[in-house]
Image: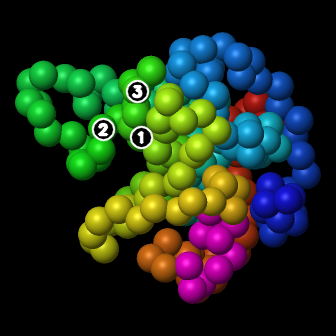
Amino acid sequence: MWVQRVMELTGWEPLGISVDWAAIEGELGVALPADYKELYEVFGGGVFSDSLYFLGHDEGLTFDFLTEWRVSLSVDQDSKFGEVSAVEPYAIYAPGGKGLVPWGSTEWADEYFWLIDAGRPGHYPVLARAHGVGGWHRYDMSTSEFLYRVLADADFQPFGIAHYDLGTTFEPGSSDAE
């Protein structure tokens, strides 16, 4: 339902991208949210409203969530940084554990993650933080509902961008989506 609402909001026609989700989920050691997979198959990775970056699976390209996750995990586990994490008080998800996996951000440095717990499959709360607003915000809603609210609901603070009147567009991030 929410994926459909995002499509209607942006006027986007589904791309029908084919993805080997079993391989991706095998590396992560956990299934990804079903609506995220549907969002990616419809849109691919790219930019909503010229400001919200949606990570898809475009290996090696700017909008690849798996590459973002690998880099974040590497930095989070690098001993030269000690016990400090860029996502305090959380950690970046490591296979079989509990932590954050990035799936989106904005040009204003807002960051969107899933809190994934391998012990609780099928449960994917969205954790978000807004640059300069302080602290984490937890949303027990799907990825697509969160995305829709950010794009369409000006009162969805501190993340709603509708009040900026940027339009509700989508620009694919790779040539695969064209």
Residue hosting label 1 = 100
The residue that mark 2 highlights is 91
Q: CA distance from mark 1 to mark 2?
A: 6 Å
Range shown magenta: 146-156
Q: Nearer the viewer, mark 3 or mark 1?
A: 3
Is disc 2 surrounded by few (<14), some (14 to 19) or many (20+) residues within 10 Å? Answer: many
Q: Is residue 150 above or below residue 43?
A: below
Identify the residue shown where x is 35% and y is 35%.
92
Q: CA distance from mark 3 to mark 1?
A: 10 Å
Regarding residue 148, the answer to whether it shows in the image is yes
Residue type, numbered disc 3:
Gly
Q: Quickly name the residue at label 3.
A: 97
Which percent across, then down, holds residue 76? 25, 31
Residue 149 is covered by the magenta coloring: yes
* Residue drawn at 35 percent across, 62 percent down: 136
- Cβ–Cβ below 8 Å for labels 1 and 2? yes
Residue 71 placement, left or right of 112: left
Q: Is residue 83 above or below residue 36?
A: above
Q: Nearer the viewer, mark 3 or mark 2?
A: 3
Assess disc 3: are there few (<14), some (14-19) or many (≥20) residues with their C-alpha within 10 Å of its C-alpha.
Answer: some
Along the viewing direction, whichever of 176 and 3 lies nearer the viewer: 3
Residue at mark 3 to residue at mark 2: CA–CA distance: 10 Å
Residue 114 as seen in the image, left or right of residue 12:
left
Residue drawn at x 85%, y 59% as measured from the top left = 1
The amino acid beneath tag 2 is Ala
Badges 3 and 2: C-beta atoms under 8 Å apart?
yes
Q: Secondary structure at mark 3?
A: loop
Q: Earlier in the sequence, mark 3 or mark 2?
A: 2
Helix, strand or loop status at disc 1: strand
Image position of 144 with respect to 98: above or below: below
Between 10 and 3, which is closer to the camera in this rendering?
A: 3
Circle 1 residues within 10 Å: few <14, some 14–19, many ≥20 = many
